[in-house]
């Protein structure tokens, strides 16, 4: 019987989690990660206290300070997720090739689908752990006001989707290249290239709409922006002022009436699923997706 990702115990997840969690590096990494977030937030808080006379310590001033601290922490954590996730996922399969253990893994009863998802979720478990442990730090923003629990839920859901999408890119390149260094570098370059090109093309297309002879009342968001998680996080941060399109002088909703960050998440999930399916095929082309491996003599 095949062992899949949804069984009670996926051997890949169990093994990888034991390796990751039994050492001191994980605890040290989490401490350093939270320390960076706490330091940045504390420095901004000190600046707020020193300028309290300027803010006049009013409720609106405290809410504004809370929003600014929240935005700084949100963008910083988003950047760290983009930085850490490729390093966690780009070597999942290529490292098995380098250690010459991939063939042994493929010879087990596990399906290709179970191996890929097991590797992905075991690598993402560290990212999810970082996200979860940062929740108490973000909750301190509630002391200032200006941020609701709903805003926090949207933000952390988007973090998870972003980590899943970026992790799938790293997984794809890990199956495509034999060396971990190559897979990691190409993953970072792909993320940087997609982010930069999508913003340039998207801004150009929006500028054409705005400078046209007849400006649309409800403009369409260029599809190229839907692949960029940075634009999605910008939309979440701009929710209080009308959303992404408000930055261009329009209303806050897309033509479909759905918030941009939601559509952005759906597009990224779809791309991630496609990359994972390709990764399943690449890891062992002679085995059908999710099926039993072929044996000699079978017709």
Image (cartoon, rainbow, N blue to C red):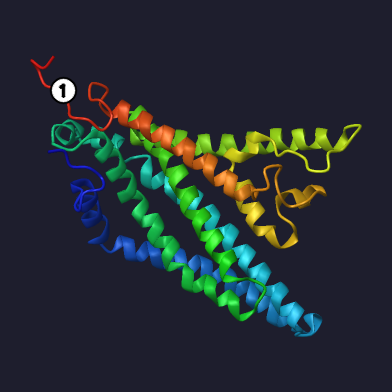
* Image location (x, y in percent) of residue 262: 58, 49
* Image location (x, y in percent) of residue 195: 60, 39
- Report the residue at 28% width, 36% height from top: 113
Q: Quadrant of residue 218?
A: top right
Element at label 1: loop
Q: Quadrant of residue 281?
A: top left
224 displayed left or right of 286: right
- Report the residue at 59% width, 58% height from top: 75
* Image location (x, y in percent) of residue 284: 25, 26
* Image location (x, y in percent) of residue 197: 64, 33
268 displayed left or right of 52: left
Residue reaching furthest to the left: 297
- Quadrant for the C terminus, please: top left
Per the image, the residue denoted by label 1 is 294
28 displayed left or right of 10: right
- Report the residue at 60% width, 81% height from top: 143
């Amino acid at each position: 019987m095949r062992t899949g990702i949804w069984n009670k115990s996926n051997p890949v997840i169990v093994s990888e989690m034991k390796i990751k969690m039994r050492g001191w590096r994980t605890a040290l990494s989490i401490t350093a990660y939270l320390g960076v977030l706490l330091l940045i937030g504390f420095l901004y808080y000190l600046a707020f206290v020193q300028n309290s006379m300027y803010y006049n310590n009013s409720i609106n001033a405290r809410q504004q300070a809370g929003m600014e601290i929240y935005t700084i922490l949100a963008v910083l954590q988003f950047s760290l997720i983009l930085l850490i996730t490729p390093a966690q996922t780009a070597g999942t399969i290529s490292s098995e090739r380098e250690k010459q253990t991939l063939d042994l893994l493929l010879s087990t009863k596990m399906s290709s689908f179970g191996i890929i998802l097991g590797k992905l979720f075991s690598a993402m478990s560290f990212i999810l752990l970082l996200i979860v442990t940062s929740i108490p730090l973000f909750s301190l923003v509630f002391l200032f006001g200006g941020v609701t629990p709903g805003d926090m839920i949207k933000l952390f859901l988007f973090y998870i989707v972003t980590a899943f999408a970026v992790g799938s890119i790293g997984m794809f390149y890990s199956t495509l290249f034999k060396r971990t260094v190559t897979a990691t570098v190409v993953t970072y370059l792909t993320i940087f290239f997609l982010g930069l090109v999508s913003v340039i093309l998207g801004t150009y297309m929006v500028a054409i709409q705005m400078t046209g002879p007849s400006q649309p009342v409800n403009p369409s968001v260029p599809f190229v922006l839907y692949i960029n998680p940075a634009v999605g996080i910008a939309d979440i941060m701009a929710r209080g002022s009308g959303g992404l399109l408000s930055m261009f002088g329009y209303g806050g909703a897309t033509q479909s009436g759905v918030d941009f960050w939601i559509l952005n998440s759906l597009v990224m999930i779809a791309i991630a699923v496609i990359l994972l399916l390709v990764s399943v095929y690449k890891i062992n082309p002679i085995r059908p997706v999710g099926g039993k491996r072929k044996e000699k003599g079978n017709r």
